[in-house]
Image (tube, helix red, strand yellow):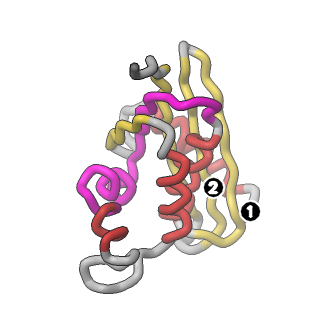
Amino acid sequence: MSEKRSTVILYTDGACSGNPGPGGWGALLIFNGIEKEMSGGEPHTTNNRMEMQAVIEGLKALTRPCHVKIHSDSALIINAFTKGWIENWLKKGWKKSDKKPVENKELWQAMIKEAEPHTVEWIKVKGHSTDQLNNRVDQLAVEASKKYQ
């Protein structure tokens, strides 16, 4: 018998001043109308790493298996999970089609691990546009990055 999973909305974003440079991530969890904002950063990082960290931290905050609708403006993250890139990287020993190693392997592995107990829906949103919640997590990420500048 399958359990009824709660649906959680997760918006994530990363920001970096310079690439690499000081960076920040932001995440917003929404469950039953309750919102939880999270953010953090690093003094020397990349935008992709911060995008990934936002997803990891958002998923880590969940206390039980859920149906998670992850909204991200990162085409890299969305495509990796929706276009079979992850499966191909795993089959090829974390190598891309050009035989080069996948960058940020440890963060991809952490994302996979954190997503495992959940049913995840990956939703691409347009960055810096009219999506208010995406703009909100972008602001969280930018503010977090400023602590390291």
Precedes in sequence: disc 1 or disc 2? 2
Specify the farthest residue to the bottom. 99
Nearest the viewer among 3 and 75 is: 3
- Residue 49, relative to residue 3: is it above or below? below
| Secondary structure found at label 2 | strand
Residue 24: percent from left, percent from top: 63, 55
- Residue that appears at 40% across and 82% down: 101
- The three-letter amino acid code for the residue at tag 2 is Gly
| Secondary structure found at label 1 | loop
- Residue 129, relative to residue 147: is it above or below? above
Chain part drawn in magenta: 62-86
Specify the farthest residue to the front. 1
Indicate which disc residue 148 carries: 1
- Residue that appears at 47% across and 54% down: 112
Residue 62: percent from left, percent from top: 61, 34
Nearest the viewer among 44 and 135 is: 44
Residue 11: percent from left, percent from top: 49, 37
- Residue that appears at 61% across and 23% down: 35
* Quarter of the image that includes the N terminus: top left
* Pointer 2 residue: 24
Give the side of residue 9 with respect to residue 61, left or right. Answer: left
